[in-house]
Image (spheres, rainbow, N blue to C red):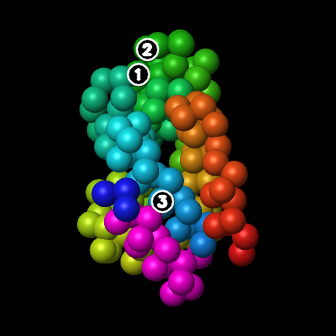
Amino acid sequence: AEVNLLYFSFLELEKGVVKSNLIRLIFEYRMLQIQGIGPNVYECVVCTEEKNGMLFDIRRGGLVCPDCIAKNPMLKEDKPFRILGDTVYTLKYILSADIKKLFSFNVSEEVLMDLKRISGDYFRMHVGHTFKSLQFLTED
């Protein structure tokens, strides 16, 4: 899976249609998923229900619903933050799409900013470091 992901990522970079920083983010999120530490964007990581108005909690690794945040003051300490519904949809697509269709979309600047914010913080929290070699992909 990793080899195919890398191969298709390089193919897309060569085509030059999708922004390189989006290709990098797609690559990062799929690698996290392959390694078993990808974010949960399908349901609340606490109560496992899907509700409106969910926030992203980096420490807990995914979406947290407003009810769980209201019931558990410790969740507030994690400082969960709002992300766009389009960002949640995009993450669901990135984590579930067939690899041959994975790079068949573009996103707004707002969604791209959400994806970058989550990715950077998520890597620091769940991987423990960032990869300097990935920086070459973000030089637009």
Let me know if residue 14 is in the magenta part. Answer: yes
**Label at residue 68:** 1
Is the N terminus in the top left, top right, bottom left or bottom right quadrant? bottom left
Gap between marks 3 and 2 measured at Cα: 35 Å
How far across and how far down the image is residue 96, in percent?
29, 57
128 relative position to 4: left or right: right
Report the magenta residues as a range: 4-19
How far across and how far down the image is residue 15, in percent?
51, 87
Decide: few, some or many residues near mark 2? Use Cα within 10 Å; few <14, some 14-19, many ≥20.
few
Is the C terminus in the top left, top right, bottom left or bottom right quadrant? bottom right
Disc 3, SS: helix
Report the amino acid beneath label 1. Cys
Report the amino acid beneath label 3. Phe
Disc 1, SS: helix
- How many marks the image carries: the answer is 3
Query: Which of the marked residues, 3 or 2, is nearer the chain's N terminus?
Result: 3
* Residue at 69% in and 59% down: 135
* Residue linked to disc 2: 71
Position above or below: 32 against 20: above
How far across and how far down the image is residue 136, in percent?
69, 65
* Residue linked to disc 3: 27
Gap between marks 1 and 3 measured at Cα: 31 Å
Decide: few, some or many residues near mark 1? Use Cα within 10 Å; few <14, some 14-19, many ≥20.
some
* Residue at 54% in and 78% down: 13
In this rendered view, identify the residue nearer to me: 7 or 53: 7
Residue 24 found in image quarter: bottom right
* Residue at 50% in and 38% down: 56
Gap between marks 2 and 1 measured at Cα: 5 Å
In this view of the protein, can residue 81 be seen by the observer?
no
Residue 121 found in image quarter: top right
